Image (cartoon, helix red, strand yellow):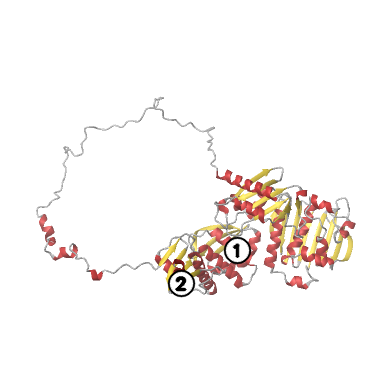
Amino acid sequence: MANQIAAGEVIQRPASVVKELVENAIDAGATVINVVVVDAGRTSIQVIDNGRGMSETDARLAFERHATSKIRKADDLFALRTMGFRGEALASIAAVAQVELKTRMEDDDIGTHLSISGSRVVAQEPVSCPVGSNFSVENLFFNVPVRRKFLKSNTTELNNILSAFERIVLVYPEVSFTFHNNGVEVFNLKASNTHQRIIDVFGKKINQELLPISVDTTVCRISGFVGKPESARKKGAHQYFFVNGRYMKHGFFHKGVMQAYERLIVTGDQIPYFIYFNVEPENIDVNIHPTKTEIKFDNEVAIWQILTAAVKDALGRFGDVTAIDFDVEGKPDIPVFSPTGDGFNAPKVDYNPQYNPFKESGQQVYRRNYVPKDWESLYEGLKPNSSEQKDFFDVEPPSAEGIIEEKAPTHYQYKGRYIMTAVKSGLMIIDQHRAHVRILYDRYMQQMASSGHSSQKMLFPEVVQFPPSDIVMLQKVMPEMEHLGFELSDLGGGSYAVNGVPTGIEGVKIDSLIKDMVTTSMESGSLDTDAINHSLALSLARNAAIPLGQVLSNEEMETIVNELFTTSNVNYTPDGKSILCILKQHEIEQMLG
């Protein structure tokens, strides 16, 4: 019972099992780790490594609560060099699943096969197996049906597994990893350096967005990569902090990174970064939460200042104009003009100074008499008293009764953001961007509900690169995106060609739009059709709506106001933000009274 209670914190979902087993494999010194999942971990999770393996006694003891070879006393928590240390993971996994372990040490001729179900040892026998460990976890939460019932869909659970997997592979580039889901290879990562591992996980395009950072002080050593200002995105940016080989979440350090981009990116946008801290183990405490993602530092303020300075330095070096050094070795010499004359003569032009184009020569010149003798007859119809002149040249000005005063504008735009218009009760103020989001959202939702869709072919298809974790969601929302008007074709390797887009989104960056739509669908957490349609329509409406600061004509403002009042909700955007407010007449009088 104690193990099952502990599993509620340590093993929350299949991703927790993958995380714990892979971290154990790394602590065992493995150089090759293979992960195989079936049905997003519900049916089976298998982790195979070529580490040191375990003896027959250690294999049996490893599943006991608090049995660990990584620490021997409480003080060792402040000198940790391993991923795991509490000895709770294997005991918690065995308490809520059916586990089989095959392991062998290098010096042993034969290995050990151990079967455990619900914390009870079912069988233990010798087996022939390679050096290392092979964990197979099946039927997770089979004896805790309530926990199994509250697992999310396979797509959501697979995304969580891939996220946990990515956090580990990014910090151990010297280890080779493979990942298979339902027999399909998702990752095949060869041993490399940190930069190449980031490219292997997130695609080649991210290589153009990264700037290296590196600083070494007595307090800590910081290395990694941060994104260029033009790589900023509203959401879905890849942001990772690692300390001593362990992934962590740290809002204070995140603010330090974003402060370096102040006035370089739009407020609210996010920058990708992969930052690795290396500090002395006694200066941090990782034993705060069972997930070990929250870490406390003894000198947070000093590290924050070093981090901000390192990011600013990387941005400063990126913005400098480098000196141009022409390589002239082996190139032909280009002669340079010298006014003193070094054997080079200026070109001369020969001309005849006596030539006069207006002087008649001996040749016959034909001329026309441009003024005919009877030229007056050509203008007989244009005499002062003729009716033709009156029609064309002597038009009488209109009377004062025919002049219509030009109509004053009915709307006023304030600071390129708000539309102000008079109503019976006072002054109505409309946020033009939010109003357009509501208009477009209703239009897209209606379009997806109908059978037809309008798509505009792209003259030059644009290629969008997705990491494996995003591809899982992309394949789920692909039918709805096609219903909106997108046409995507799979090029392999996580690349998709965008052959068509919905009409009416001219000027929108297609790459960022599609990634934002997929990210929004992932964040929604629900995979029913209505939720997917809502997230896709909202994301598309946000990107296609008129931006803040765009100057509108009176006709354009009139169109927005009229279309807004035909939508399903004139007061709020689909995500609950206010669209308009009315300043009452009596409030205006009180302010001016």
- Label 2, on which residue? 586
> Where residue 289 sits in the image (x, y, percent)?
76, 59
Residue 380 lies, in percent from the top left, at 11, 60
Q: Is 182 placed above or below 307 here?
A: below
The amino acid type of the residue labelled 1 equals Val
Specify whether 307 is left or right of 539.
Answer: right
Residue identifier under label 1: 518
Nearer the N terminus, badge 2 or badge 1?
Answer: 1
Q: Is residue 424 left or right of residue 330?
A: left
Quadrant the N terminus occupies: bottom right
Specify few, some or many for label 2: CA neighbours under 10 Å numbering under 14, 14-19, or 20 or more: few
Say which quadrant the C terminus sits in: bottom left
> Which amino acid type corresponds to the residue marked 2 in the rendered image?
His
Is residue 446 among the parts visible in the rendering?
yes
Q: What separation in Å lies between label 2 and label 1 (alpha carbons)?
A: 47 Å
At 76% across and 67% down in the image, what residue appears?
A: 43
Residue 293 versus residue 305 in the image, above or below: below
Q: Secondary structure at mark 1?
A: helix
Vertical order, 257 against 513 (above or below): above
Left or right of residue 98, residue 515 in this image = left
Q: Secondary structure at mark 2?
A: helix
Is residue 493 shown above or below 402? above
Residue 481 visible in the shown view: no
